[in-house]
Image: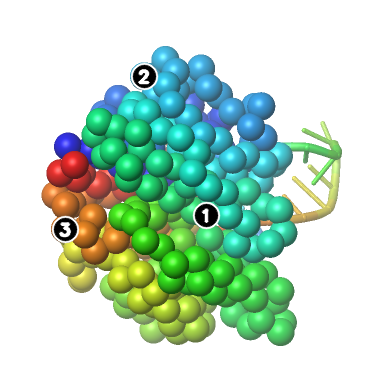
Amino acid sequence: MLSVATWNINSVRLRAEQVTRFLSEQAPDVLCLQEIKCAEHLFPHDVFEAAGYTHRVVHGQKGYHGVATVSRVPLREFSRHDWQDNGEARHVGVELLGPAGQGLIIENVYIPAGGDIPDREANAKFGQKLDFLERMTRWADALDRPTLIVGDFNIAPLPEDVYDHKALLKVVSHTPLEVETLTRFADAHGWVDLGRKHIPAPERNWSWWSYRTYWQEKDRGRRLDHMWASPELAAQSRAHRFVEEARRWEQPSDHVPLVTEFDL
DNA sequence: ATGCCAATGTTCCATTGA
């Protein structure tokens, strides 16, 4: 048995208490973090060391973005892709060294949000988001071993992945162009969306709620965080959950963690 | 009705997030 989690933590230094609680309560073997918001030399290694996560790979950046994968099982850094080609720290891949999950590749990714306007001409960030996905698609085309890709995709692909499908068709994160582009990425490798394998639509499994009071009061969430597996790996997933209660903890991240358990 | 919140560092204001 191997359990893997992903969480956009929105500053790992500020949320040491919350991440410690999550590790204690859910006990994943591996946790992939996004938006750690610090350079590698400022990563709070002591917090994870004390919790038993003695294996860590950090791809940090000063101030913004940044990803890290921490683990109770041995692993090694496998890859770092810059799919935006601008130096931002938005990906790190690891290979598990076993015995649990021996040889498994876990890709931890933070896809760009894409700005406000869903138009490449009017908003360069939207174009960068689409380009990031196109480069991921070419990468996925060439994959030749079982892989798990997790993280903050910043896209809610299904109508049931948002609180109001029709209202969000023109809102970045749920536009048809983003969904089509993400679908091409999915098709490039046959990725299985574990969130919807285990919690089929229209069952609720949102992962993000805005910090703004109005939107929280209305319970307007979106499913922006994902765990996708190669087909042969997906066949070994046994359980999957969204820890929605973490959104109500003190000083929470605006995202909640996801956990998948595998027979490995 | 998407910055009215939250975080960082450029720090008493600007930038970013989705």
Residue bearing the label numbered 3: A235
A173 versus A31 height, above or below: below
Residue bearing the label numbered 2: A52
Nearer to us: label 3 or label 1: 3
A233 versus A263 height, above or below: below
Residue at mark 2: chain:
A
Image position of B5 (left or right of A95): right
Q: Could you tell me which quadrant the N terminus of chain A lies in?
A: top left
A246 versus A48 height, above or below: below
Tell me, yes or no, whether dots 2 and 3 are on the same chain.
Answer: yes
Residue at mark 1: chain:
A
Quadrant in the picture for residue A54: top left
The foreground one among A106 and A241 is A106
Circle 3: residue type: Ala
Marks 2 and 3, how far apart at CA? 29 Å
Image position of A84 (left or right of A234): right
Image position of A151 (left or right of A237): right
Circle 2: residue type: Gly
Residue bearing the label numbered 1: A110
Marks 1 and 2, how far apart at CA? 25 Å
Circle 1: residue type: Tyr
Residue occupying the point 71% across, 53% down? A87
**Any mark on residue A175, and which?**
none
